[in-house]
Image (tube, helix red, strand yellow):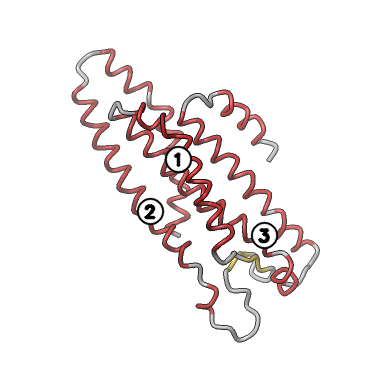
């Protein structure tokens, strides 16, 4: 959380650029997700039983976890989409709708936070599960199907968008005969790498 303070400041200073506004939104989402991680950690240290945590802590623990995860997934897709628009010299179209898309991504995260089953921490397994492992209730009762759909959507959509991006980048580099054109493509490199690094971890976690 402490390391995020200078990161948030740096992203806030570049907020006029849609790409950095999305990354700022992603950073805020991550701060909320990290804050929710304090609950299972402190509960584990205090040796709170899973039954107590299931009854009393699920609203603090599991609600932000699922919501912020799904919000981060959509935020990563927005980053990739923006890079695609920029490569097509259509970034102005994305820029005009960036704030609306961020609002929609926020609504998407809130839907998962408040209208789907929460994920719960388990002290004996040191992990998080949808099933609280209490009683004889079938596991299927606790499955969060929208979350499963979100993960599949992220993997398939990210792969498709990145394949398109690579194809466009290769074609543009081949078409850029002037030095100015090649410099422009090279200048996009750092932001492309930033967006890719952020997204690759979400795709890997979704696959898992």
The residue lying at 48 percent from left, 35 percent from top is 99
Which mark lies nearer to you, 1 or 3?
Answer: 1
Residue indicated by mark 3: 61
Q: Residue furthest right?
A: 46
Report the number of discs: 3
Whether label 1 touches label 2, CB < 8 Å: no
Residue 189 in the image: above or below residue 134 = above
Task: Check disc 2 and report the residue beneath it.
Answer: 155
Coordinates of residue 129 in the picture (x, y in percent): 58, 68
Q: Name the residue under label 1.
A: 101
Circle 3 Cα neighbour tier, 10 Å, few/some/many (<14 / 14–19 / ≥20):
many
Q: Mark 1–mark 3 contact, CB under 8 Å?
A: no
Rendered image: mark on residue 129: none
Residue under the image location 45 percent in, 60 percent down = 208
Disc 1/disc 2 C-alpha distance (Å): 20 Å
The percent position of residue 150, horizontal first and vertical second, equals 44, 57
Q: Position of residue 83 (x, y in %)?
A: 37, 33
Left/right placement of residue 90 relative to residue 101 reads left
The crowding category of the residue bearing disc 2, from other C-alpha atoms within 10 Å (few below 14, some 14 to 19, many at least 20), is some
Q: Nearer the viewer, mark 1 or mark 2?
A: 1
How far across and how far down the image is residue 86, in percent?
34, 29
Q: Tell me where residue 152 sits by quadrant.
A: bottom left
User: Mark 2, mark 3: which one is toward the viewer?
Assistant: 3
Q: Which of marks 1 and 3 is nearer the N terminus?
A: 3
Q: Which of marks 1 and 2 is nearer the N terminus?
A: 1
Q: Calculate the distance from the C-alpha at mark 1 to the C-alpha at mark 3.
A: 27 Å
Seen at 51% across and 71% down, the residue is 143
Q: What element carries label 1?
A: helix
Q: Considering the numbered disc 2 on the image, is that residue within a helix, a strand or a loop?
A: helix
Q: Looking at the image, is 181 positioned above or below residue 91?
A: above
């Amino acid at each position: 959380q402490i390391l995020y303070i200078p990161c948030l400041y740096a992203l806030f200073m570049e907020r006029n650029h849609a790409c950095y506004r999305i990354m700022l939104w992603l950073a805020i989402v991550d701060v909320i997700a990290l804050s929710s991680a304090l609950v299972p950690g402190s509960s584990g240290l205090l040796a709170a039983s899973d039954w107590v945590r299931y009854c009393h802590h699920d609203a603090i623990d599991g609600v932000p976890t699922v919501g912020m995860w799904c919000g981060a997934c959509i935020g990563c897709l927005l980053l990739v989409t923006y890079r695609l628009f920029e490569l097509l010299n259509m970034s102005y179209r994305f820029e005009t709708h960036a704030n609306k898309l961020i609002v929609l991504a926020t609504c998407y995260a809130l839907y998962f936070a408040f209208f789907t089953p929460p994920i719960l921490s388990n002290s004996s397994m040191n992990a998080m599960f949808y099933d609280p492992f209490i009683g004889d209730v079938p596991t299927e009762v606790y499955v969060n199907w929208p979350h499963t759909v979100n993960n599949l959507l992220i993997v398939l959509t990210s792969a498709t968008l990145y394949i398109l991006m690579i194809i466009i980048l290769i074609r543009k580099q081949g078409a850029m005969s002037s030095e100015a054109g090649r410099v422009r493509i090279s200048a996009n490199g750092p932001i492309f790498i930033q967006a890719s690094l952020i997204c690759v971890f979400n795709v890997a976690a979704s696959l898992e």
